[in-house]
Amino acid sequence: MKVAVTGASGLVGSQLVKALTAQGYRVNALVRRQGKTPELKHPMVKEVVGNLSDQLALDRLVEGCEVVYHLAACAKMWAKEDDLFYRVNVLGTYNLVSAAKDGGVKKFVYTSTAGKYGPSLAQVITEETSRSVDYLTEYEKTKDEAEHVVREAACDGFEVFILNPTRVFGPGLLSESNGVTRMVKMYVEGRFRFIPCNGKSIGNYVFIDDVIAGHLMVLERGQSGENYILGGENCSFNEFFDLLNRLTEIRIRMIHLPYVFLWLIASFFEMVTKVTSRPPLITKKWLKRFLYNWEVSSQKAHRTLGYTITPLDVGLQKTIARLDQCRVVQ
């Protein structure tokens, strides 16, 4: 079987391609620049140069494919063009869906984000949770809009599946979307000493191998039109760094930065950005995420797909052991 993958040069995409070729699939991988990602150099992988606005490239990408995995996205904290998130995440998804349907693709897997459900307020987030807080970032908003594009395209002969990973970590490419592993690496190197706010904000951390397994499982056991949260363990910042302390035996005194202080820093960076157009290290919109908990449940994926969770300490141990193999990408 031939499979198409967008976002193939990213953390999840590159490892998904590796897993697919290991199972005997031939892969068409969409890349912006040929040869940029050594992980894609494989006799079963064909790189297709283009982007989500290039309809001819998308037609070449899906040619002869039965399955499309759509992982490409604008996942930045900030973008110079106001409409970049919409153009890439929504219009780009529409273009790919159109190419897939016209090209005879039978199954379309869309990798979204658990962040689209919003923070957990009264209860842990599940696939049935309705968002009760305004979108905090353009990324969340446009990924949710793209889900509607995918879901509305479902019909006889064209099955669609939507996956919602949480905060992915693990050995691999140190891209902007692998921020958790970059944080772990800086901690091990003694360059990360700050915890946002009081450190009690809870997030969900999922090991990369579990996310890849979920992408493979959904083809065999998923139900068209359904969402599946691919998560790991719920853990606060304080608990996360306590665990890192124990696993690495690196004694670093972590400093809690109050929200007001972080807000002032974010405001400063945004002012600098207006003058220089350089991306800010953090924005006020992104900072609001630290005011909430983001607890999720992966029980639906467990029941339906057979999805399992790698314990956080085990995943971190594997990540720490392979940090020297991680490659920084822009």
Image (cartoon, rainbow, N blue to C red):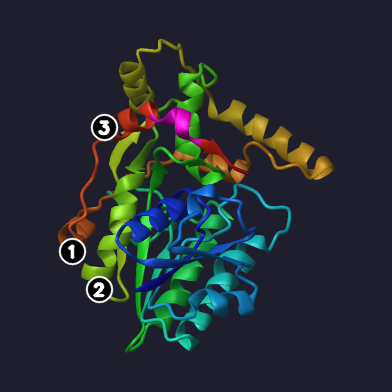
Q: Where is residue 322 in the image (x, y as percent from the top left)?
A: 40, 30
Amino acid type at mark 1: Thr
Q: Which image quarter is the C terminus in?
A: top right
Q: Which image quarter is the N terminus in?
A: bottom left
Q: Residue at x 56, y 65 (%)?
A: 89
Q: Position of residue 296 (x, y in %)?
A: 30, 49
Q: Foreground residue, 21 or 284?
A: 21
At mark 2, the secondary structure is loop
Q: Do the residues labelled 1 and 2 touch (CB within 8 Å)?
A: yes
Q: Foreground residue, 227 or 47?
A: 47
Q: Which residue is drawn at 55% across and 19% down?
A: 191
Name the front one of labels 3 and 1: 3
Instruction: Write down the residue under mark 1.
Output: 304
At mark 3, the secondary structure is helix
Q: Position of residue 318 (x, y in %)?
A: 32, 32
Q: Residue at x 60, y 47 (%)?
A: 77
Instruction: Write down the residue under mark 3.
Output: 314
- Which residue is situated farthest in the front direction here? 43
Q: Going from the N terminus, do you reach mark 3 or mark 1 first?
A: 1
- Quick check: 242 above or below 220? above
At mark 1, the secondary structure is helix
Amino acid type at mark 2: Gln
Q: Mark 1 and mark 2: span between their CA atoms?
A: 9 Å
Q: What stretch is highlighted in magenta?
A: 322-326
Q: Mark 3 and mark 1: span between their CA atoms?
A: 24 Å
In terms of image quadrants, where is residue 3? bottom left
Q: Mark 3 and mark 2: span between their CA atoms?
A: 30 Å
Instruction: Answer left or right for 330 relative to 221.
Output: right
Amino acid type at mark 3: Val
Picture disc at residue 223: 2
Q: Going from the N terminus, do you reach mark 3 or mark 2 first?
A: 2
